[in-house]
């Protein structure tokens, strides 16, 4: 059997690629649209939704602390579904939980919050949906993890279930904590 | 050995049966099937009930296997003149791939999983996919992707056989060409779909999912040209075999990337690591196996006819080197974020600037060679007389370059270069017909006769190259002179874009069968003369709680005016996105022209799978293109 060593180069390169792809599989792919990856949130300035809770502007997300930005609406079933989880994580000291109320009528949204409880430190009212569009929101609920430098580190589309929290969101927060 | 044909046809019959059954479930909205619940609903138009079959992971993998089975059955049926052993081996390789993917469908992605308690209605399909563009984009893409499996199977069969000759290349080329045509159409449709559905006015995003369809296209284009050298000159054999393996491997890698979610992408497919492991295993078996076989068998193959530095072979080799380099560039850009993530856990993203700096410079020599190559003779030629033949194209290109550079006062040198190259390709390709017909050098009648008797493969090549010229012109123009105007408008207000006046006449409610919508009517005029009226919609799908945009596009095949209706605010104004895209229609017309050229070539009698013996005689008189 004659074998020329250079002919093994393609096999070797492919083996390297396959190994990398294999490792890639065990890796969190991070569902983040590339347009926002590791960038600050686009600028917005939203008025408060209810009395006594501040509105939200992009400058509030510029850093200092880790923040979870939740996009919700009273008309959205998934938001109702994840709400108990929001209440549960709101006491976590590692981050601040803030929200954008998206394309909602203020009366209904305020009722919704008073009925189910307010987990949010700040709620901006985005009635036109403009801020949501700039953030690349495709549907509510959605949650963004913003690190201490004010960069978006993770985006989750859909309700935060306990499972999503443990496997996707919490590890990102732990990682940011660990690195800083 | 005849068994291979029967089993290939059998695979096709059974997979087609499964696919028909799934389609029937979708059309009749059988909600006892879980897949129908998650991706269909009663109120959906029939077209989308059918396309719903492949608008989800399980169904689309079934479509994948179906197309693989179609190709297997096609080799079995139309490959009557293949040497029996080569045919049996090729079908065996095809069968192995099919078995692997059938196992994948059965074990990890069962499309027929039933529910104990069927719900009264389904959750509906992702609204963004409910579009005629999507109805045909995946099937064409898969016909291309999977079509390259034939080249792969032929290559592996030839390696096992230890023999590659001109006949082999003649068998493989039609399949490669067919797959290439389908992939070209698939990518073109995908780009157009993204253009008018996403509402951002973009037509190519260098997104990983786009890239993984583009890489097999680049490698497949290289394969198309190198197989030509094998057929005509029996050179580049080992390279062509490697390329055949690589092209299909890139298709498999694409399937892997899309289905496993190792890379982030705007394409939100269901992603599941377990499926990723399975496809990776298939990829390792197919590519790893084939490359190992290649390493051990290549020394036993005999080939190689020498050629001079200036010759058709050299130009095609250069074509191959450049195309593969381009594919490698896209590969690097696509996978770099993954590699970096694995090594340093940093998140980076590679954007258009990377591709502009790396991909574009590789394209420039490729586009120059593209015109020169086909005029060169096989084996040995001289550059000077060939440039002489092309002097009109050269002059036109130079004139365009200087003209644009001066007109833009030197601020757009790259644009001038791009347009110069486009003119070089277009005029140069047309000149090929002129030379072929000896126009002006002989009588009109004999020119006509020469033109008429030129093989279809020749015209196919010219048309495909012309198509690329159109694409180059379009990319250059649209990227330089597109205009964008994003503003809020009240009905009755007007705005301007690129010399046109746009009036938002009114916004109406326009509900559809499974969505509610707002439709904006826009009147476009120029200097007070009405040009056209377009409507753009913003749709809201209640079942999925999602909204989509239906853009309004006014085109005259030279430019597009593109209107997308955005959000309303509380003062009765709407966000409106307006774009002016000069030459944008040529992007897709050019893509389709390329595919048309491919199909025309495919219809050449020399390519007809049934007629290679007779083709021998014709080959002797007409150089293949």
Image: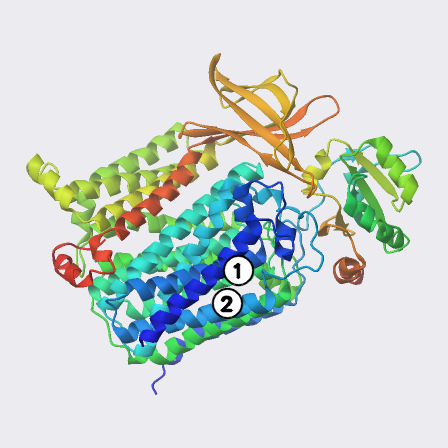
- Residue that label 1 marks: B61
- Residue A168 position within the rendered picture, expressed as x and y whole percent measured from the top left: 74, 59
What label does residue B101 carry, if any?
2
Instruction: Tell me: B557 left or right of B25.
Output: left
- Residue B243 position within the rendered picture, expressed as x and y whole percent measured from the top left: 37, 65
Name the foreground residue: B21 vs B158: B21
Instruction: Tell me: B453 left or right of A118.
Output: left
Q: CA distance from mark 2 to mark 1?
A: 8 Å
State whether residue A132 is above or below residue A161.
Answer: above
Label 1 is found on which chain of the structure? B
Hey, which quadrant is residue B144 in on the image?
bottom left
What's the residue at 20%, 50% (across, down)? B375
Hey, which quadrant is residue A161 in on the image?
bottom right
Residue farthest along the left direction in this orientation? B443
Instruction: Tell me: B597 left or right of A150.
Output: left
State whether residue B288 is above or below residue B226.
Answer: below
Name the foreground residue: B422 vs A128: A128
């Amino acid at each position: 059997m004659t074998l020329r060593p250079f002919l093994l180069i393609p096999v070797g390169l492919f083996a390297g690629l396959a190994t990398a792809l294999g490792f890639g599989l065990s890796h969190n792919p991070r569902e983040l649209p590339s347009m926002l990856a590791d960038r600050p949130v686009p600028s917005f300035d939203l008025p408060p939704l209810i009395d006594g809770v501040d509105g939200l502007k992009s400058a509030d997300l510029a850093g200092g602390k880790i923040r979870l930005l939740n996009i919700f609406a009273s008309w959205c079933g998934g938001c109702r579904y994840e709400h108990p989880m929001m209440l549960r994580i709101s006491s976590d000291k590692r981050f601040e939980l803030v929200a954008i109320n998206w394309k909602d009528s203020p009366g209904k949204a305020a009722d919704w919050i008073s009925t189910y409880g307010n987990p949010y430190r700040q709620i901006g009212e985005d009635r036109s949906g403009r801020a949501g569009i700039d953030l690349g929101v495709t549907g509510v609920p959605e949650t963004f993890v913003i690190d201490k430098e004010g960069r978006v580190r993770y985006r989750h589309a859909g309700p935060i279930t306990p499972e999503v929290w443990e496997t996707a969101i919490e590890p990102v927060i732990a990682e940011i904590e660990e690195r800083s | 050995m005849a068994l291979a044909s029967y089993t290939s046809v059998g695979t096709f019959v059974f997979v087609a049966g499964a696919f028909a059954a799934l389609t029937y479930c979708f059309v009749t909205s059988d909600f006892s099937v879980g897949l129908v619940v998650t991706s269909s609903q009663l109120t959906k138009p029939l077209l989308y009930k059918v396309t719903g079959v492949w608008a989800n992971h399980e169904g689309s993998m079934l479509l994948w296997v179906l197309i693989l089975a179609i190709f297997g059955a096609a080799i079995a049926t139309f490959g009557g003149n293949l040497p029996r052993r080569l045919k049996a081996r090729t079908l065996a390789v095809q069968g192995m791939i099919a078995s692997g993917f059938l196992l994948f469908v059965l074990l990890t992605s069962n499309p027929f999983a039933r529910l104990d308690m069927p719900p009264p209605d389904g959750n509906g399909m992702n609204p963004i996919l409910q579009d005629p563009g999507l109805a045909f984009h995946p099937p064409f893409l898969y016909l291309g992707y999977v079509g390259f499996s034939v080249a792969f199977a032929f290559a592996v069969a030839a390696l096992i056989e230890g023999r590659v000759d001109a006949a082999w290349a003649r068998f493989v080329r039609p399949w490669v060409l067919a797959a290439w045509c389908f992939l070209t159409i698939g990518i073109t449709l995908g780009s157009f779909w993204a253009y008018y559905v996403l509402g951002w006015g973009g037509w190519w995003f260098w997104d990983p999912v786009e890239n993984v369809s583009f890489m097999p296209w680049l490698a497949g284009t290289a394969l198309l040209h190198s197989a030509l050298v094998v057929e005509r000159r029996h050179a580049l054999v080992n390279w062509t075999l490697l390329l055949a393996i690589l092209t299909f491997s890139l298709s498999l890698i694409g399937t892997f990337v899309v289905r496993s979610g190792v890379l982030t992408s705007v394409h939100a497919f269901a992603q599941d690591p377990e499926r990723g492991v399975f496809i990776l295993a298939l990829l390792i078996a197919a590519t790893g196996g084939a490359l190992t076989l290649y390493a051990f068998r290549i020394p036993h193959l005999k080939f190689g006819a020498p050629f001079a530095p200036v010759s058709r072979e050299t130009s095609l080799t250069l074509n191959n080197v450049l195309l593969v380099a381009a594919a490698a560039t896209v590969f690097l850009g696509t996978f770099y974020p993954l590699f970096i993530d694995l090594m340093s856990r940093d998140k980076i993203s590679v954007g258009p600037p990377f591709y502009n700096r790396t991909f574009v410079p590789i394209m420039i020599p490729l586009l120059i060679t593209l015109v020169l190559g086909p005029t060169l003779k096989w084996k040995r030629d001289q550059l000077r007389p060939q440039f002489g033949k092309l002097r009109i194209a050269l002059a036109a290109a130079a004139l365009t370059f200087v003209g644009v550079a001066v007109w833009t006062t030197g601020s757009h040198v790259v644009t001038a270069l791009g347009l110069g190259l486009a003119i070089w390709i277009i005029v140069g390709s047309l000149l090929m017909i002129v030379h072929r017909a000896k126009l002006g050098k002989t009588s009109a009648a004999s020119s006509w006769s020469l033109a008429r008797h030129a093989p279809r493969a020749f015209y196919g090549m010219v048309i495909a190259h012309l198509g690329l010229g159109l694409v180059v012109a379009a990319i250059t123009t649209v990227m330089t002179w597109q205009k964008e105007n994003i503003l809020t408008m009240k009905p009755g207000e007007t705005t301007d874009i690129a010399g046109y006046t746009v009036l938002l006449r009114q916004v109406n409610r326009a509900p559809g069968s499974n969505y509610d919508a707002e439709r904006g009517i826009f009147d476009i005029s120029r200097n007070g003369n009405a040009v056209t009226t377009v409507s753009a919609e913003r749709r809201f799908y209640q079942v999925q709680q999602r909204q989509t945009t239906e853009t309004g596009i006014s085109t005259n095949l030279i430019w597009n005016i593109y209107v997308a209706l955005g959000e309303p605010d509380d003062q009765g104004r709407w966000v409106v996105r307006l774009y002016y895209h000069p030459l944008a229609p040529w992007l897709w017309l050019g893509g389709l022209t390329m595919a048309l050229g491919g199909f025309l070539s495919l219809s050449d009698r020399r390519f007809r799978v049934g007629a290679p013996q007779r083709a021998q005689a014709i080959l002797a008189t007409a150089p293949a293109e």
